[in-house]
Structures are given as structure tokens and as C-alpha cells.
């Protein structure tokens, strides 16, 4: 992979924004992205950026409200210290505001921007979300509002996706309601 972080593979160029595809990365070697460092990051970020819920929710749970409807039953610091057994799911919005993560995010963003330019498109609203989940956790069914690059850093996760324009999964009315929702 040379000195690059991401290897999308030329065979995936035609799939971008059309369907899911796998790619390789070497982010798991970054010291800032090791579990111990990520725990420290989460605990020093402002509360309004960190959402914690139980990792044992149903696939039908509302992802946007999981931190309210299925909150963890312990302090965030305890959940993070006992992450392997605390059945916790933590989502962090814009963790790159922390100086220790901004450099890594900048490098990843630059490589994705370069990939997009090869495809004659632009990435206009890059947003980073960080998810940490206890073993055997479930991420509720949801739609991402953006084209998404999912980087698995540690462990294993089964991910199910569908073709983005599959009307059997969601009809136009529901899709319009989803994108019209204000956050």
C-alpha cells in the first residue's frame, strides 16, 4: 500500500456511490487509534459529542435515539474501563476536533478526496464519526445520510448493506421523510 492509509483498489472505482465495496487500510497501526487512546479521547471530549448506549439493542431500535432510549447503566468512564464486558456502544461526533486525532483525520480525508477527484466528483461535507462497541454488539438498522467509508480498526463485525436505490428496502416517501428530517 506504499505510504498510503487507504487502498480502495481500482476495481472499486465504478462502484463508488453505486454499491458497497471492501477496501484495505492501515489505520489500526496508528497509535491514536488504539483502544486505550480512544478511551482517553472519549473522556476528554465535550459531553455533547459523545453518545453512549447499551450494545444489546434490537436491530429495529432507533439509532438516533438509542443513547436516550437504551442508555448505559453506569458512568461512561466505568463503561470505557470495562469495555469488553460492559455491553456498551459509544458514538462520537467529530472526534477530530481533538488535536491528537486531527492529523490522522486530515490524512484520511486527503486520500479520500484524491480518490473522489479520480472519479471526477468532490467530497463536500466530510464528517467523522467514531464508534466503539463491546463484543457482540448490535448496531440498529439505519440509513446513512452520506456516502460512508467504514473503517474497522479492531475485532470483527458483520455488516449488512443493500443497494442504495433498492425500492424493496425503502420506498420514495419514507426516503424523502428521512432526508427531510432536521437534526
Image (cartoon, rainbow, N blue to C red):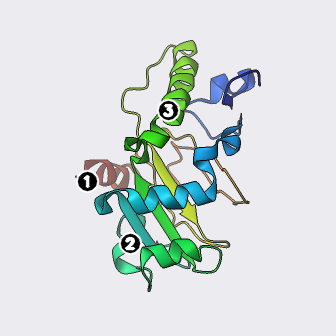
Per the image, label 1 sits on a secondary structure element best described as: loop
Which of the two labelled residues, at mark 2 and mark 1, occupies the earlier sequence position? Answer: 2
Which residue in the protein does label 2 denote? 67
Relative to residue 161, is residue 108 depicted above or below? above
Q: Are marks 3 and 1 in contact (CB under 8 Å)?
A: no
Please indicate whether residue 35 sits to the left or right of residue 71 in the image. Answer: right
Residue 131 percent across, percent down from the top left: 52, 57
Residue 21 percent across, percent down from the top left: 68, 38
Residue 43 percent across, percent down from the top left: 42, 63
Q: Is residue 97 visible?
A: yes
Residue drawn at (71%, 42%), measured in percent from left and top?
29
Q: Is residue 169 visible?
A: no
Where does the N terminus fall, quadrant-wise? Answer: top right
Relative to residue 4, is residue 133 depicted above or below? below
Per the image, label 3 sits on a secondary structure element best described as: helix
Q: From mark 3 to mark 1, how far is it between C-alphas? A: 32 Å
2 vs 1, front mark: 2
Which sits in the foreground, 34 or 176? 34
Which of the two labelled residues, at mark 3 and mark 1, occupies the earlier sequence position? Answer: 3
3 vs 1, front mark: 3
Label placed on residue 62: none
Which residue in the protein does label 3 denote? 103
Residue drawn at (72%, 21%), measured in percent from left and top?
10
Q: Are marks 2 and 1 in contact (CB under 8 Å)?
A: no
Q: Are marks 2 and 3 in contact (CB under 8 Å)?
A: no
Label placed on residue 181: 1
Amino acid at each position: 500500500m506504499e505510504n498510503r492509509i487507504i487502498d480502495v483498489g481500482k476495481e472499486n472505482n465504478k462502484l463508488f456511490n453505486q454499491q458497497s465495496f471492501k477496501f484495505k487500510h492501515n489505520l489500526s497501526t496508528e497509535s491514536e487509534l488504539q483502544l486505550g487512546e480512544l478511551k482517553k479521547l472519549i473522556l476528554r471530549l465535550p459531553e455533547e459529542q459523545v453518545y453512549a448506549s447499551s450494545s444489546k439493542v434490537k436491530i429495529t431500535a432507533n439509532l438516533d435515539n438509542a443513547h436516550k432510549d437504551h442508555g448505559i447503566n453506569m458512568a461512561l468512564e466505568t463503561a470505557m474501563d470495562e469495555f469488553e464486558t460492559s455491553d456498551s456502544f459509544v458514538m462520537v461526533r467529530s472526534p477530530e476536533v481533538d488535536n491528537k486525532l486531527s492529523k490522522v483525520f486530515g490524512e484520511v480525508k486527503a486520500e479520500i478526496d484524491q480518490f473522489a477527484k479520480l472519479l471526477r466528483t468532490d467530497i463536500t461535507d466530510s464528517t467523522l464519526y467514531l464508534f466503539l462497541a463491546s463484543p457482540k454488539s448490535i448496531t440498529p438498522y439505519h440509513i446513512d445520510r452520506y456516502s460512508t467509508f467504514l473503517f474497522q480498526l479492531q475485532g470483527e463485525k458483520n455488516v449488512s448493506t443493500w443497494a442504495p436505490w433498492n425500492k424493496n428496502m425503502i420506498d420514495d416517501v419514507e426516503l424523502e421523510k428521512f432526508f427531510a428530517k432536521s437534526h
